[in-house]
Amino acid sequence: MRGLILTTLIITALILLVRELSKLLRKQAVPVPGQTPDAQLLKRPGKGGSPSDPVVVESASVIEAHAVGQDCAACASPVSVEDHRAERRGERRLRVVEVKCRHCARRQLLYFTIRTSAG
Ligand SMILES: [Zn+2]
């Protein structure tokens, strides 16, 4: 009898533990607004998908239009621009556009560089 009560208590404790752990994991999966961990970002293959291979544009004004013209790398659905910022990588100035898929909500970074008259 004592063994049965003990077993029941242990099983109950384990169920509660699993429930709390899954709650915790679900909480972590929710993206924090304004803060995108790199792990959630989908790596985009090809031109513009990495800082070392940015898309070269003539002017900053065409960057967002170019970005929304790209499809989601995961499901090929249209994307929308979430963020557009300037970054410096060594000597290079980059424009980084964060896009979000309108279908699967995956985020991707697109890298651009503006061609200067000096070359
Ligand atoms: Zn998608």
Image: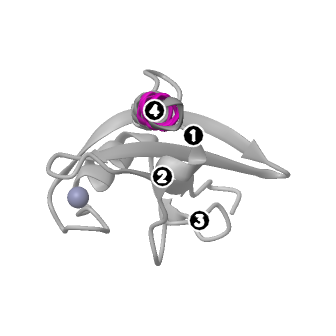
Q: Is label 1 in a helix, a strand or a loop?
A: loop
Q: Is label 4 in a helix, a strand or a loop?
A: loop
Please tell me whether residue 82 is drawn above or below residue 103 in the rendered image: above
Whichever of labels 2 and 4 marks the residue nearer the N terminus, that label is 4
Cα separation between marks 2 and 4: 54 Å
Q: Residue at x 33, y 50 (%)?
A: 106
Whichever of labels 3 and 1 marks the residue nearer the N terminus, that label is 1
Res 49 label: none
Disc 1 vs disc 4: Cβ atoms closer than 8 Å? no
Q: Quadrant of residue 83?
A: top left
Res 1 label: 4
Q: Is label 3 in a helix, a strand or a loop?
A: loop
Cα separation between marks 1 and 4: 51 Å
Q: What residue is shown with label 2?
A: 41
Disc 3 vs disc 1: Cβ atoms closer than 8 Å? no
Q: Is label 2 in a helix, a strand or a loop?
A: strand
Whichever of labels 3 and 4 marks the residue nearer the N terminus, that label is 4
Q: Which quadrant does the N terminus fall into?
A: top left
Q: Residue at x 67, y 39 (%)?
A: 87
The amino acid sitting under disc 1 is Pro
Q: For the magenta stretch, what is the residue range?
A: 5-16
Disc 2 vs disc 1: Cβ atoms closer than 8 Å? yes
The amino acid sitting under disc 3 is Ser
Cα separation between marks 3 and 4: 64 Å
Q: Quadrant of residue 12?
A: top left
The amino acid sitting under disc 2 is Leu
Q: Nearer the viewer, residue 78 or 24?
A: 24
